Image (spheres, rainbow, N blue to C red):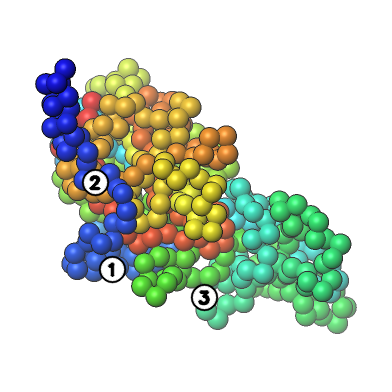
Amino acid sequence: MLLFRLIAILSVPVFLSAQLSAGSAWPNVDDTTRKSVFKFSEEYKKFISTAKTELTTVRETIALAEKKGFKKLQENSPWQPGAKYYDVNRERTISLIVVGKRKLKEGVRAIASHIDSPRLELKAQPLYKSNGFAQFQTQYHGGIKKYQWANVPLALTGRIDKTDGATVWIDVGNKPDDPIFIIPDMAPHVDRQYRNRKASEVFKGEELDPVVGSIPGKDDNIETQIMKYLESTYKITRADFISAELSLVPAMQPRDVGFDRGLIAGYGHDDRSCSYIAIRASLAVENPAFTTVSFLADNEEIGSRNNTGAASDYIRGLLGQLLYLESPDESSERHLRLVLKNVHVLSADVTSGINPIFPGVQEAQNAAKLGQGVPIKLYGKGSNPNSEFTARFRGILEKEKIPYQTHTYKVDVGGGGTLGGFLSLEGMEVLDIGVPILSMHSTYSICSKIDLWYLYKTFEAFYSDTKRLN
Ligand code: MN
Ligand code: MN
C-alpha cells in the first residue's frame, strides 16, 4: 500500500502536463515568437477584411492556394506524394489537399471548419419604400441577437444569376469610400412604449430592414428611383433578385483591441479564424506522411444543410475520388469505408470564451478562456471524441509544447454543435477544437492573437505528425 502510494506520488509530475494551461500563454512566448504571432495576425486581418462570406472566402482561398502551387483537382490528376490540389464544390465549399507518402487507408489527416457566418440575406423580392426611404426586406442566416445588427454599417455582397447565364457580382460597402447600408434604431426620446420588449425582440426579424436610398425622382417615388439605379448599374431586373445570393455583412474592418494590441475585433471570426488557419496549415505542409485535407464548408450556421454543407455527401465523394486516383483498382465502397474509418478530423470552430462582464454564464473550471491555450471541446452527450483519440491528439500537443485547455458549456445552460457530428456519421474519428472568442455571432467579435497562433501551431503539428493514429 505504502509502496503504491509512493509510486503514485512519484508519478504525479509525469502526468501533470506543463501544457495543460493554468493561465495566460503570453508570458511564456519569447520575442521571436511574439513577432511571429503579430505578423500572423496581420495576415489574418487582411484575409477577413475581404473574405466575409463563403463566396468571397472560396475566391480568396483559391488565390492563396494557387500562389503556393496548388492545382485544381481533376478526374485524372496524377497521384504522387507531395502533390497539392484544391477542390471546389459549387463555389461555396473548398478543400485543400496535400498528398501523403502513406496509403489513404493507413490514415488521412483532416481539418474541417466553416466559411459562412451569421448575416442578413435579402429576400427574393427585397426592394420596397416606406416613409420616404427605400429599404430591403431581409431574413437572417444563423443564430443572431437581432438588436446587434441595428446602427451598424452594413455592406452588400454576393451574386445575381441571370437567365442568360451571366453572373453579376455585387460588393458595396467594404471599401472606405463606398456608401453603406444601415438599420436605424429609435431614439430614446420616443421609444417608451417599446421598452418592455424582451431582449430577443428589441428588434424583431421583420424589422431588420436597412435603408438603401432616399433621393426620389420627379415622380417622388424612391422605390422606382433605386430600381432604376440597379437596372442601369448592374443591368438587372426585379425578377433577377429571385436568383440571387445577396448578403448584408458588417462593413467594419478588423481592428486591434487594447493598448497592447493583444486582441482583434472583427466580423466573422466564426469561423474564418479556424478556416484561415486551416488554409495556412495546408499551404505550409510539405511532403506529409499522411494525406492532409483542409475542408472548408458552407451553411454551418443553419445546420450544415444543402449540397454545400457538411451534412451533404461532398466530403465522402471527395475522399472517394482521392482513393480512385491513388488506387483505381481498390476504390469500391468497401475500400472507401476502410479509408473513412481512418480519417482523423479536427473539427475546428470558435467557441464562447469567458466574458469578463458576464463570467457567470460559464462554469469557470471547464470553460475556455481567451489567451490560455487551444480549447479541446468536450461537450459530452455523445459528441466527445473517443478517449484514445483525445489521448493521441494530446500527445501531439505536448510533444510540440502547445498550451491547451478544455471547453464544456454550463450544464443545461449553453450548447452548440458544429461540423464534427456529421463527419463522425461517416465513421471518421473527430475531435472538436477551436478558438475562444467574445461577442460570438455579433457584428464585431473579439479573438486573441495568441490563440490564432497556437491553433496554427496545432494544425501544423497535426499535419506534419508521422505517427499512425489508428
Ligand atoms: Mn462556428
Ligand atoms: Mn456560429
Secondary structure under the numbered disc 1 in the rendered image:
helix
Question: Residue at (45%, 26%) from the top-left corner?
Answer: 382
Q: Given the image, on which type of amino acid does mark 2 rest? A: Gln
Q: Outermost residue, front direction?
A: 2
Closer to the observer: label 2 or label 3? 2
Q: Is residue 349 left or right of residue 130?
A: left
Q: Is mark 1 within 8 Å of ligand 1?
A: no
Q: Which residue is mark 1?
A: 39
Instruction: Name the image quarter holding the N terminus.
Output: top left
Q: Given the image, on which type of amino acid does mark 1 rest? A: Lys
How far apart are the alpha carbons under marks 1 and 2?
24 Å
User: Which one is earlier in the sequence, the residue at label 1 or at label 2?
Assistant: 2
Q: Which residue is mark 2?
A: 19
How far apart are the alpha carbons under marks 3 and 1?
23 Å
- Residue 11 lies in quadrant: top left
Q: Which residue is mark 3?
A: 175
Q: Position of residue 258 (x, y in %)?
A: 42, 72
